[in-house]
Amino acid sequence: MVRVALDAMGGDYAPAEIIKGAVDALLATGKDDLTITFTGDEAAIQAELQKLRADKDRNGFDESRISIVHTTEVIETGESPVNAIRTKKDSSMVVALKMVKEGKADAFVSSGSTGAILVGGQVIVGKLKGVRRTPLAPVIPTLRGGALLIDCGANVDAKPEYLLQYAHMGSIYMEYVMGIKNPAVGILNIGAEEEKGNSLVKETYPLLKAEPGINFIGSVEAKDILDGKADVIVCDAFAGNVALKTYEATGSMLLGMLKSTLTSSTKNKIGAALVYPSLKAKLKKFDASQYGGAPMLGLKGLVVKSHGSATAKEIKNAVMQCIDFSRQNIAEKIAASFAKETSAQKED
């Protein structure tokens, strides 16, 4: 049984889409697979659950697998993350994070403030022993499936040893959660040649190249991400976040242009009706919501950040992601990996 603490008040469409997604996850799993604890305004949560009881697509969910912890505060996106985590002790986010810390939940999911989640993950849940930095790592769609972009927002100023650890954590995640054996690891760079890049990339490259247990394939340019050249793309959070936001914005722009073109005339609408089934299947491959949220790797418990604009589909997949993560003991595997590293350093 995997216990997920879900921040019902975080995100643009909270609490409605958050609760819908959680209920969808319950409907997709068995009674021994998952329980959900919502943290937030109990009256608002109960009102949304009441709507779902009358929803023909969602009624009949097992309410015995749902619990609510009432909270009186919400951390807003514009607040100082550090101050909010310190002062809003009864916020839906802090209460849910404390559940993970205290062993009352196996995982935490939120669409709320990214900064507050990053601070809360480290301050409340805490880092695993031996982990230098905890990266945020979303799986992004590519032509060959999904690739892990690590880091995309947690540590703007990185060191070579951080990126080396990211490669290990990313490899563990992709192998045991995504089912990719011996995942290919690349470092995000401005060219394919080993001598290219800034000082961080140049110093990290030989470390990755010499590291046993990592299937390092060299540099990965931004244009290679879509092709799926690497399963794990290692970078500092500044470069990773720029790549991710550009990636998402380009996809949104292209979809918008395509929709506009296909509906611009009667002739185009007829053509669109003919190609729609095939087009829908192709575009589905590039729907990032299918992978859920971005896990914060290297913590003592699982913390998952979903998009601020996440709808029920993404929340459902983020919750389902927690089941795979927990059952595969990812945190324990990461801890074991770095315990070996610490032991080797002491011997040296």
Image: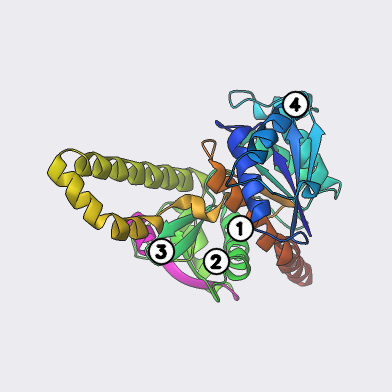
Judging from the image, what secondary structure is the residue with disc 4 in?
helix
CA gap, disc 3 to disc 2? 13 Å
Q: Amino acid at mark 4?
A: Ala
Q: Which residue: 71% across, 32% down?
A: 45
Earlier residue among tags 3 and 1: 1
Find out whether residue 22 is within the magenta segment: no
Badge 3: residue crowd in 10 Å (few <14, some 14–19, many ≥20)? many
Q: Compared with residue 38, is residue 166 higher up or lower down, i.e. above or below? A: below
Badge 2: residue crowd in 10 Å (few <14, some 14–19, many ≥20)? some
Choose between 103 and 262: the one closer to the eye: 262
Of badges 4 and 3, nearer the viewer stands 4
Q: Where the N terminus falls, by quadrant?
A: bottom right
Badge 4: residue crowd in 10 Å (few <14, some 14–19, many ≥20)? few
Q: Which residue: 63% across, 32% down?
A: 15
Q: Position of residue 30 (x, y in %)?
A: 72, 61
Choose between 276 and 69: the one closer to the eye: 276
| Residue under label 1 | 161
Q: Position of residue 234 (x, y in %)?
A: 50, 58
Q: Compared with residue 213, is residue 118 higher up or lower down, i.e. above or below? A: above
Q: Which residue: 59% across, 44% down?
A: 56
Find out whether residue 226 is within the magenta segment: yes
CA gap, disc 2 to disc 4? 53 Å
Q: Is residue 348 visible to us here?
A: no
Of badges 2 and 4, nearer the viewer stands 4
Q: Which mark is residue 170?
A: none
- Counting every numbered tag in the picture gives 4
Earlier residue among tags 4 and 1: 4
Q: Compared with residue 344, is residue 34 higher up or lower down, i.e. above or below? A: above
| Residue under label 3 | 219
